[in-house]
Each structure stands twice: as structure tokens, then as C-alpha cells.
Amino acid sequence: MRKMHISTPPLPRLADLSTVSLLAIEAGLKRREALALEMRNVPGD
């Protein structure tokens, strides 16, 4: 029951949390872009 203590962060931490999630989303998009480029550059097309 104590595992979900992250779901209710104190207010000052909320900004940090959204920043972290934004960074994670950006990193994920960049990785997907890199993967798409890799797929496009596969020889034998």
C-alpha cells in the first residue's frame, strides 16, 4: 500500500516531476527518430 507514495508529491516537487517527464518524452522522441533513420538507412532497400 505504501508503494504509491510518489502519486502525491508535495507541491514544490510537482514542477520537478513535470520537468522530468518532459525530458523523458523528449528523449523518447529523439530515440524514435534515430530508430526511424536507422530503419531507412538499412541496406538492401
Image (cartoon, rainbow, N blue to C red):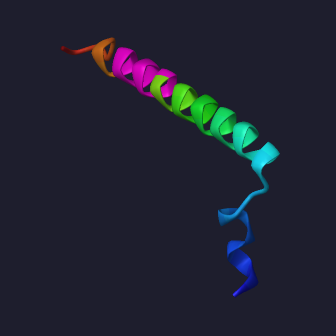
In the displayed structure, does residue 18 sit left or right of residue 36? right
Report the residue at 29% width, 15% height from top. Answer: 40
Report the residue at 32% width, 17% height from top. Answer: 42
Report the residue at 54% width, 25% height from top. Answer: 26
The residue range painted magenta reads 30-38
Residue 9 % position (x, y): 74, 58
**Main secondary structure type of the part rendered in magenta:** helix
Instruction: Please tell me whether residue 37 belongs to the stretch shown in magenta.
Output: yes
Residue extending furthest toward the bottom: 1
Q: Is residue 25 above or below residue 1?
A: above
Report the residue at 76% width, 49% height from top. Answer: 11
Q: Is residue 8 above or below residue 20?
A: below
Residue 39 % position (x, y): 32, 22
Q: Quadrant of the C terminus?
A: top left
Q: Quadrant of residue 10?
A: bottom right
In the displayed structure, does residue 34 sit left or right of residue 2? left
Residue 12 % position (x, y): 81, 44
Q: Is residue 9 above or below residue 27?
A: below
Closer to the camera, 25 or 41?
Answer: 25
Closer to the camera, 45 or 18?
Answer: 18
Total marks drawn?
0
In the displayed structure, does residue 22 sit left or right of residue 4? left
Instruction: Please tell me whether residue 44 belongs to the stretch shown in magenta.
Output: no
Closer to the camera, 23 or 16?
Answer: 16
Residue extending furthest toward the left: 45
